[in-house]
Image (cartoon, rainbow, N blue to C red):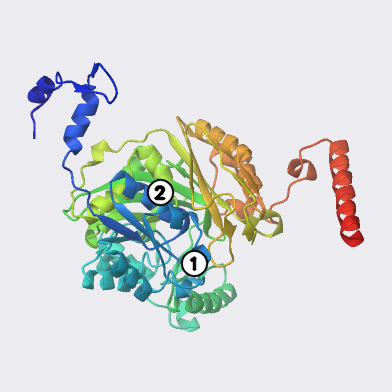
Amino acid sequence: GISKPRAARMLSITSRGVGSPRPTRIPAFIFYRCLSTAGNKPPFSKILVANRGEIACRVFRSCKKLGIKSVAVYSEADADAVHTRMADEAICIGPAASADSYLRIDRIMEAIKTTGAEAVHPGYGFLSENAHFVEELEKNGIVFIGPKSFAIDAMGDKIHSKRIANEAKVNTIPGYVGEVKDEDELLKATNEIGYPVMIKASAGGGGKGMRVAYSDEEAKQGYRLSKREAAASFGDDTIFVEKFVEEPRHIEIQLLCDGHGNGVYLNERECSIQRRNQKVLEEAPSTFTTPEIRAAMGAQALQLAKAVEYQSAGTVEFLMDKHRNFYFLEMNTRLQVEHPITELISQVDIVEEMIKVAAGHELTLTQDDIGVHGWAVESRVYAEDPYREFLPSTGLLTTYEEPVGEEIRVDTGVAEGSEISMFYDPMISKLVTHGTDREHAFAKMREALDSYRIRGLRHNLAFLRALCDHPKMISGEITTKFIAEHYPDGFHVSIERRFPFPPLTRFLHSFYFGVNMYMCVHVYFSM
């Protein structure tokens, strides 16, 4: 390397700008940056992203930033998708159904061989937590941008992960440690623990295979339903039971760990706003934690990561009761959907760090480098009808105009004219805002939601806007039961809220529309 004094002397050297008769001086900060990056080889030459939509696009952006070529895989239904066009290369891996494309390990392996990709980023969902996929990559000398298969296996089974958490001195919810094999064993366990209890699928995730019970009868019914749902969703009907934490908050810790024994936590995320155990709106940090609690949660999350020799980005989820006691829930051994809010308040590019760690680099961050820079909020924008029990909506985005402005970020995999199909998750985008404090971040979110334009299908923008305006949300008095408690009969707003025009204007609009429809029909049948 060149010493700074020598570099300073070299700054007096001038270069001629193209087409310029006068010499141009290179600014010092650019020169030093060039020195620090000159000759730096990208971690990989080519990365394949085994996913689709917004998360594939998100990974491609980091690849481009690092000078890495990118490969998209796509199903026949995604032939014209944004992620397919965004990558340097794209290869079809099968029909529309996920089971015949994005979940086909053999076809993804063939795509890797065809394109010469050195590494694979799984995104989230699909094969992101499939240990067999990781083993297949390792066997073929392909780098998986994520943890080792051992860590995925260990944390993928909720019973096993709870045992590991106990051994690592991580707070766990009181419960029956082991599989509940029948209803007699279930009732014995629930009566030892005390109601209410949570009946859960060991292989579960995404809120599936979970039931709360307040009595023996509810426990038996919940056991049967959870077992059936778990078998259908995960191919594994193993069930366990634990104490149900009342008035809980869902608070999670984002981790980054390398293969050299280093790890940091990137603060917490508040993910309590959920509908049927699916996150709807997240924020970071949480209004409920304190610096001391954050440090304690972070330390326990790192203890758990160390116990499974974790490397890459990962998230340890906790439930926190009204007394601020926190308990291990599960570890997600992948990149989380809601990672952007952590990136904004920590000022760390999590995807970039994942890529570098996978290439064997040491983390350059220490815990002292991680601060809390303002506040961030994420709204998950879905193609669904909040006025009809959130039924998924499919079709073409005939109008799609994203909000723009300072501190507004939109992570998406669609554009105007894109199709939201029945084959995949109906997420349109993740709308993220950042502010100096919580009030500022939510003000930016309201502004962004108000300027978002989506037509051609139903969407949940009005519901997200209502959440931002709710007095309990504004005060931060939230739990995982927020939506169930405040919208017990579903989401309903008055016609004045849905169509904010004076009555006469609404009447004239309806009359004009009716006349137009009549004329169209009349002309059609007159032809």
Q: Residue at x 28, y 47 (%)?
A: 67
Is label 1 or label 2 in front? 2
Q: Is residue 81 left or right of residue 1?
A: right
Q: How many marks?
A: 2
**Residue identified by numbered label 1:** 198
User: In what quadrant of the picture does the C terminus appear?
Assistant: bottom right
- Residue 107 x/y as whole percent: 37, 73
Q: In this view, which residue lies farthest toward the top?
A: 22
Vertical comparison of 262 with 329: above or below: above
Examine the rendered structure and indicate whether residue 22 appears above or below residue 165.
above
* Residue 423 visible, this angle: yes
Looking at the image, which is closer to me, 444 or 371? 444
| Mark 1 residue element | strand
Rendered residue at 61%/52% (across/down): 483
Q: Quadrant of the N terminus?
A: top left
User: Which amino acid type is shown beneath numbered disc 1?
Assistant: Met
Look at the picture and state if 409 lies above or below 520. Answer: above
Give whichever of 124, 255 is nearer the camera. Answer: 124
Residue 75 location, x and y as percent?
47, 67
* Residue bearing the label numbered 2: 339
Q: In the rendered structure, which disc, 1 or 2, sits on the residue that comes first in sequence?
A: 1
Is residue 350 visible to us here? no
